[in-house]
Image: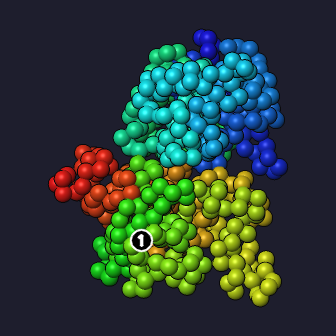
């Protein structure tokens, strides 16, 4: 960018009757880090998709270096030096890292040398502290590593304006500071960064300026020096939000409801993911599972919910051995509910309306069907009740759920999974990509289930979320639990050592 930078003037965008953007004015200074904040559904991603050419605005104009531009496609955006890293990754899993990075890179033809690109990519990755093997197939990489590949794709194309949509959502706590330092290096090199995040401490640590969107319009625009995390949260949601540990009552029961012993399992393509995992969860207890993404957490959730067979070991629920039971029996007879990590790929059918997604778990129950006939009117009434009680913001229960924001999609999944009154609730990455208001709502729902006596397994890479609601914290590394500690014992040093593979006895 030149000294004039980027200017958006009176940008509007409407989807049907819904006005996603309402006259947005935004100025981004060159060689700066500009944070964009807002609730889920406030219009942040829509605005960035317009800037990247994925959407066309209904009104307003975009100026780069003082020159009006019509960004008709992502190719035009890339030609202008604009790159974007989406919250939902866009990689070809069967290709290697370097193949994904050079895919679509102009000017290659018969001169393409993957080895030369791999050497340059490795140098770039090292400069940002990313330990990425350019020749590794993407399907073998954990989610955190795949996020870094997306970042490298944009950096490798030498974009001048880089849009980051929730870039740290899949990074481990000990990786975040290195990433933020990388953003500072980008700024020092003259790059302009638009940083969309719900992690207010990260915004406060790295941004120069912050713009807050509410209901499609700019509600605040100010230098970062004038905004604390608490003030930014208030500007986002229009009220005070709990940013620290929520109060919870003492455990009411010593009854062990879930007992896992020496669990072993393999990933889809054969490598061992669980290597003898054991733990107990009492009734009305939240056991958090912390760890760098890809250390067996996903496989553990799938084994408990029946989605993946256990290769060894056992699982008991209320004294009954359920190791060999199927998914349907676990969900409907045994009372196991699951909030998956991938709400788009696993938790929802995006083209189905909201009410059908609400009934999809228990569509055979009398609330939703009578014999072979679906009770559509009743299903809509139940869904509307959930929408009201869980504060799911939408136009109609008939609209496709893909048009809801991520936070509202997550609230509906929680409603569906807890309204059946489970005995065991398995939750994986429940706050990924959610704003502070939605995170608070999710955690209050989790604590309400705890109060009801549900055993809860809360899996997250975000340690601060685990510490805010969990009674105990199990740390996983390389398919094993290296220690189970209380939140009060979870210092950065202790958790860091356990994340690195040191057993609890060695740490103590």
- At 38% from the left and 86% from the top, the residue drawn is 319
Instruction: Identify the image quadrant of the N terminus.
Output: top right
Q: Residue furthest bottom?
A: 371
- At 26% from the left and 47% from the top, the residue drawn is 497
Q: From what the image shows, is residue 8 above or below residue 508?
A: above
| Quarter where residue 390 is shown | bottom right
Crowdedness near tag 1: few (<14), some (14–19) or many (≥20) residues, C-alpha within 10 Å = some
Say whether residue 491 is left or right of residue 408: left
Q: Position of residue 163 (x, y in %)?
A: 60, 31
Say whether residue 76 is left or right of residue 291: right
Examine the rendering and report whether any part of residue 358 can be seen: yes
Query: How many numbered markers are drawn?
Result: 1
Q: Secondary structure at mark 1?
A: strand
How are the residues colored?
A: rainbow
Q: Position of residue 376 (x, y in %)?
A: 79, 77
Q: Position of residue 198 (x, y in %)?
A: 51, 44
- At 70% from the left and 78% from the top, the residue drawn is 363
- At 77% from the left and 36% from the top, the residue drawn is 55
Camera-side residue: 430 or 281? 281
| Quarter where residue 113 is shown | top right
Q: Position of residue 492 (x, y in %)?
A: 27, 46
Say whether residue 92 is left or right of residue 421: right
Camera-side residue: 481 or 98? 98
Mark 1, residue position: 312
Instruction: Identify the image quadrant of the C terminus.
Output: bottom left
Examine the rendering and report whether any part of residue 224 can be seen: no
């Amino acid at each position: 960018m030149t000294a004039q930078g980027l200017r958006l003037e009176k940008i509007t965008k409407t989807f049907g009757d819904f006005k996603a953007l309402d006259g947005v004015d935004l100025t981004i200074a060159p060689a700066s880090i500009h944070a964009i904040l807002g609730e889920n559904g406030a219009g942040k991603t829509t605005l960035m998709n317009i800037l990247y050419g994925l959407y066309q605005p209904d009104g307003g104009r975009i100026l780069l270096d003082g020159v009006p531009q019509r960004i008709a496609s992502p190719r035009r955006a890339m030609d202008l030096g604009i790159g974007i890293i989406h919250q939902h990754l866009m990689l070809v899993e069967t290709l290697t890292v370097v193949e994904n990075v050079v895919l679509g890179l102009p000017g290659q033809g018969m001169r393409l040398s993957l080895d030369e690109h791999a050497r340059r990519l490795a140098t770039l990755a090292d400069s940002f502290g990313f330990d990425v093997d350019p020749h590794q197939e993407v399907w073998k990489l954990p989610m955190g590593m795949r996020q870094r590949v997306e970042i490298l794709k944009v950096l490798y194309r030498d974009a001048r304006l880089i849009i980051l949509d929730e870039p740290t959502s899949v990074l481990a706590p000990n990786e975040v500071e290195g990433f933020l330092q990388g953003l500072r290096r980008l700024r020092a090199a003259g790059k302009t960064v638009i940083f969309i995040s719900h992690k207010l401490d990260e915004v406060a640590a790295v941004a120069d300026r912050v713009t807050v969107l509410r209901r499609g319009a700019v509600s605040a625009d100010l230098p970062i020096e004038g905004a604390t995390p608490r003030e930014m949260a208030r500007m986002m949601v229009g009220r005070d939000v709990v940013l620290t540990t929520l109060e919870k009552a003492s455990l009411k029961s010593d009854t062990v409801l879930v007992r896992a012993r020496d669990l072993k399992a393999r990933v889809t393509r054969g490598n061992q993911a669980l290597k003898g995992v054991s733990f107990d969860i009492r009734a009305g207890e939240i056991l958090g599972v912390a760890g760098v993404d890809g250390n067996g957490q996903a496989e553990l959730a799938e084994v408990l919910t029946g989605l993946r067979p256990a290769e060894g070991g056992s699982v008991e629920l209320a004294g009954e051995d359920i190791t060999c039971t199927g998914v349907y029996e676990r969900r409907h007879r045994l009372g196991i509910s699951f909030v998956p990590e991938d709400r788009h790929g696993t938790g929802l059918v995006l083209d189905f309306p909201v009410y059908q997604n609400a009934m999809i778990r228990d569509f055979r129950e009398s609330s939703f069907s009578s014999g072979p006939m679906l009770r559509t009117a009743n299903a809509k009434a139940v869904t509307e009740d959930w929408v009201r009680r869980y504060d799911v913001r939408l136009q109609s229960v008939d609209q496709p759920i893909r048009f809801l924001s991520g936070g509202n999609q997550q609230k509906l999944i929680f409603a569906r999974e807890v309204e059946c009154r489970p005995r065991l609730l398995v939750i994986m990455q429940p706050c990924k990509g959610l704003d502070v208001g939605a995170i608070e709502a999710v955690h209050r729902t989790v604590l309400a289930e705890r109060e009801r006596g549900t055993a809860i397994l809360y899996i997250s890479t975000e340690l601060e979320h685990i510490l805010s609601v969990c009674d105990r914290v199990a740390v996983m590394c390389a398919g094993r639990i290296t220690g189970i500690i209380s939140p009060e014992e979870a210092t950065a040093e202790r958790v860091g050592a356990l994340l690195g593979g040191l057993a609890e006895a060695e740490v103590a």
